[in-house]
């Protein structure tokens, strides 16, 4: 370790440059954590395989933050900064499908294949432009505008997610953070007039670390929802195609049209089917899943205890009646 530090010349650096290395190292750590989250989520039932790939791009945004921080210590050419900044914005744009709830027009836009293809094309075009042109004020203005737009869109998706999950404090923190960082990109204070590549700790790396805190709160909650969904979801259709057809059907249902059907199934003691349909229904409608998942978890635990013969039939049936009552209360509310 000592040899690596000597090789990097850490001890001869200014304090500001050493802090950049530390910030960059944390960004790399966040990159590794997000890659791990993506790896874990791949086989989860509730994960949207196409949209969750956006997590890969989001993790690479932190990798570019890391690279730009490390590169700045050794004073590279100016176009290196601009290229890395453009790649960071491109990664943020490509990550937006991961945050989509499929409930708004903007979700349809970022989930469309054209979004990915256009963003990728513009990213490569940006690299070519920076490689061929001189670094004018217009280029720097475009860079700031692109970064601000990416962060603004990201802020919308983060804030909406936290509001939908009733995490109002995190939603408020997200609003404050993204307003601040977008303002820093567009209108930096006079003390930072040298530009974001000069005051990198304040405008790029420091905000990246704060973003990592919000990001980890988001992804931890997301993974927890996937785990809860997987544990609680009980599939009753053996035919996979039939299950997929039912999922598409549930997305078009209204609560009022489903209530009588669910109450009838509860009366017939078909609780698993009701739980399954309610989970899919609420997921498609982007409604809160916590209550139904708690009920599903109780039902799964009760069934498992009966299968393991750790409770007698009378207690099993009593618990089942309580679950039925909870489902009826939820359907009727």
Image (cartoon, grey):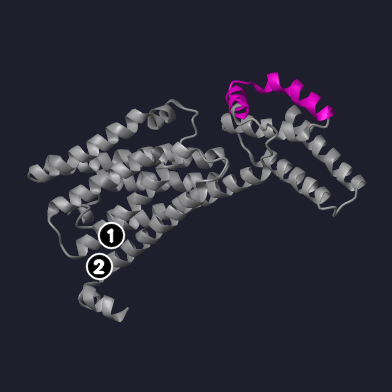
In three-dimensional space, the C-alpha distance between marks 1 and 2, rounded to whole angstroms, equals: 8 Å
| Residue 223, horizontal then vertical, whole percent | 54, 49
Q: Which residue is mark 2?
A: 16
Query: Answer yes or no: do the residues labelled 1 and 2 have beta carbons within 8 Å?
Result: yes
Residue range highlighted in magenta:
242-268
* Residue at 22% from the left image edge and 55% from the top image edge: 192
Q: Nearer the viewer, residue 169 or 90?
A: 90
Q: Residue lying farthest bottom?
A: 2
| Secondary structure category for the residue under label 1 | helix
Q: Nearer the viewer, residue 184 or 125?
A: 125
**Residue 246: which disc?**
none
Label 1 crowd bin: few (<14), some (14–19), many (20+), radius 10 Å? some
* Residue at 37% from the left image edge and 37% from the top image edge: 153
Q: Which residue is mark 1?
A: 201
In the rendered image, residue 143 lying in the magenta stretch gets the answer no
Q: Nearer the viewer, residue 227 or 308?
A: 308
Residue 333 at least partly seen: no
Q: Main secondary structure of the magenta part?
A: helix
């Amino acid at each position: 370790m000592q040899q690596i530090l000597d090789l990097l010349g850490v001890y001869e650096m200014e304090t500001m440059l050493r802090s950049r290395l530390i910030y960059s190292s944390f960004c790399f750590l966040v990159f590794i954590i997000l890659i791990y989250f993506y790896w874990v989520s791949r086989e989860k039932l509730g994960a949207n395989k196409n949209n969750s790939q956006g997590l890969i791009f989001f993790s690479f945004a932190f990798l570019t933050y890391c690279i730009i921080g490390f590169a700045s210590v050794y004073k590279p050419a100016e176009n290196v900064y601009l290229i890395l900044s453009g790649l960071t914005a491109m990664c943020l744009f490509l990550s937006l499908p991961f945050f989509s709830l499929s409930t708004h027009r903007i979700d349809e836009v970022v989930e469309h294949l054209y979004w990915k293809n256009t963003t990728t094309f513009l990213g490569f075009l940006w690299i070519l432009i920076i490689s061929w042109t001189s670094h004018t004020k217009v280029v720097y203005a475009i860079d700031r505008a692109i970064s601000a737009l990416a962060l603004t869109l990201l802020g919308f998706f983060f804030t909406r997610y936290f509001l939908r999950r009733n995490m109002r404090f995190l939603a408020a923190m997200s609003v404050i953070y993204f307003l601040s960082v977008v303002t820093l990109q567009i209108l930096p204070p006079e003390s930072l007039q040298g530009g974001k590549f000069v005051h990198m700790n304040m405008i790029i790396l420091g905000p990246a670390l704060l973003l990592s805190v919000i990001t980890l709160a988001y992804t931890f909650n997301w993974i927890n929802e996937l785990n809860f969904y997987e544990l609680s979801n009980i599939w009753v259709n053996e035919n996979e195609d039939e299950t997929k057809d039912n999922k598409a059907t549930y997305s078009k249902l209204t609560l009022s049209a489903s209530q009588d059907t669910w109450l009838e199934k509860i009366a017939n003691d078909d609780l698993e089917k009701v739980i399954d349909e309610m989970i899919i229904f609420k997921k498609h409608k982007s409604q809160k899943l916590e209550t139904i998942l708690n009920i599903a978890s109780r039902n799964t635990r009760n069934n498992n205890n009966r299968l393991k013969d750790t409770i007698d039939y009378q207690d099993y049936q009593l618990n089942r009646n309580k679950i039925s009552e909870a489902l009826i209360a939820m359907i009727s509310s």
